[in-house]
Image: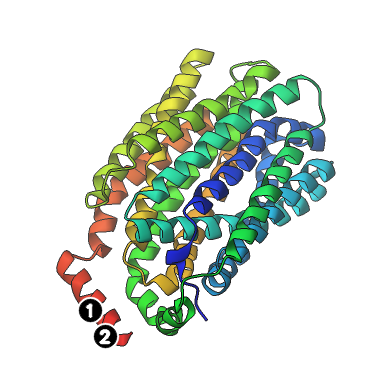
Amino acid sequence: MGVDHGHIRAWVPYAGFTVFGAFWGVWGASVPAIRDQAGLTDGQLGTALLFIAAGALPAMPLAGRAVDRWGQRVTAITLTSLGIAGVAVAVTARDLPALSVGLAVLGASSGAADVTINAAAGSAERASGRPVITRAHGFFSLAVVAASLVTGLLNATGLPVVAPYLLVALAAGAVSAAIATSDRTPADPGRHDHARTPAANSRPGLRAHMPLLLVAGGLGAIGFAVENAHQSWSAVYLADTVQAGPALVGAGPAVFALAVALTRFAISAVKTRRAWIVLTAGAVISAAGTSLLALTASLPLALLGLALAAVGTAVLFPTVLGLATANVPTAARGAATSVVSTLAYLGYLAGPVYVGHWAQATGLPGAMLAVAALATALALLAWPALRAVVPSPAQRDTAEAGARGHG
């Protein structure tokens, strides 16, 4: 039996993305401490980060199917699991094998949470007609800012690495409890009867959208690779290349995330009819900011470069996700989101690994130039890729008429 995602509580995407952002803010600012605690080189850290992908990739499609069947209760479970996994990694990361195992578990929890909260955001956006996806991702970025700054301050006081992860776990538990409680609220009469019919036809409907979902996921992967390269390595870059002190190391992820948040809120009303323009402009700005970062050893200029890179990357994934899932049948929303998110998540996970191995070979400035090359590639690919798969208005009307006929 499918779940009618039109009844997703409006606050769920925002609360879910806030917790998700808090987790990744803590992670970004604590990477240098975890690297040192485990006694790893940059290359070994890059290898360990591969295990996040190993856990996330099988979990994400399963999460998509689960959220289509059981709704936002799955979101509560995945957020709780993410909080627990973060604490476990911070406690057990004492060498490369221990960190790798912990990151595999963390990856499964994070990947599942990513799919469930994005599915909730997509459903809320379609039901309300408002830009929920972009705004919810803005909440994610604001949470990254706050969590990065708090983590930097806690690290400077000498508290254990696990301290900020415990705070995130408590927040995840509170939000999950609220989601689970709200999901027990009686739904509108006839809700489940209404949900059964589209669920039976979700696979054919999803197949019709698959080319766009795959292209959107591929473009999202490049954008996420650039975004998480900065989010995961900016603290290390400031510490090792710019020689920032412990209290300032967290400024890298914080500045990046703040610029992302402000940009997402500013462009949240922009329609996706010209998505390729948004993607191309964003990628060009990101490449310019990343190049500035790579060519300076000055803290103010490094932060300016991070801010520019953030402005450019901020628009990438929300644009492709909103475009790809806008016309997907309601009962297949979770599965469609998992297709785009799983492919995009490959980039999210590969970005930090990509930087780690380039840093081992050329140093961190060279690695940042390699990230700028990724952004340039996205700028060149966006228009031809979307032109090949985005249906015309007439094609969309025909597809929607056919879906209604099957229903």
| Direction from residue 223 to residue 30 in the image, left or right | right
In terms of depth relative to the viewer, which is nearer, 265 or 185? Answer: 185
Q: From this viewpoint, is residue 350 visible?
A: no
Position of 287 with respect to 82 (left or right) is left
Q: Residue at x 79, y 48 (%)?
A: 88
The residue lying at 49 percent from left, 40 percent from top is: 139
Q: Is residue 228 visible?
A: yes
Helix, strand, or loop for circle 2?
helix
Where is 120 relative to 329, above or below?
above
Q: Please, what is the three-letter code of the amino acid marked with disc 1?
A: Ala
Residue named by callout 2: 405
Q: How many marks?
A: 2
Residue in front for this viewpoint, 218 or 84: 84
Q: Is residue 376 left or right of residue 336?
A: left
Q: Is 95 rendered above or below residue 346?
A: above
Quarter of the view holding residue 250: top right
Residue 227 point in image, percent of width and height = 48, 40
Q: Secondary structure at mark 1?
A: helix
In the rendered view, tell whether residue 281 sits above or below residue 112: above
Mark 2 is on which residue type?
Gly
Query: Which residue is label 1 attached to?
Result: 401
Left or right, 368 with respect to 377, comes to: right
Specify few, some or many for label 1: CA neighbours under 10 Å numbering under 14, 14-19, or 20 or more. Answer: few
Residue drawn at x 61%, y 44% is 19
> What's the mark number on residue 99?
none
Q: Nearer the viewer, residue 289 or 185?
A: 185
Q: CA distance from mark 1 to mark 2?
A: 6 Å
- Check if mark 1's residue and mark 2's residue have beta carbons within 8 Å: yes
Name the quadrant containing residue 205. bottom left
Q: Position of residue 320 (x, y in %)?
A: 36, 53
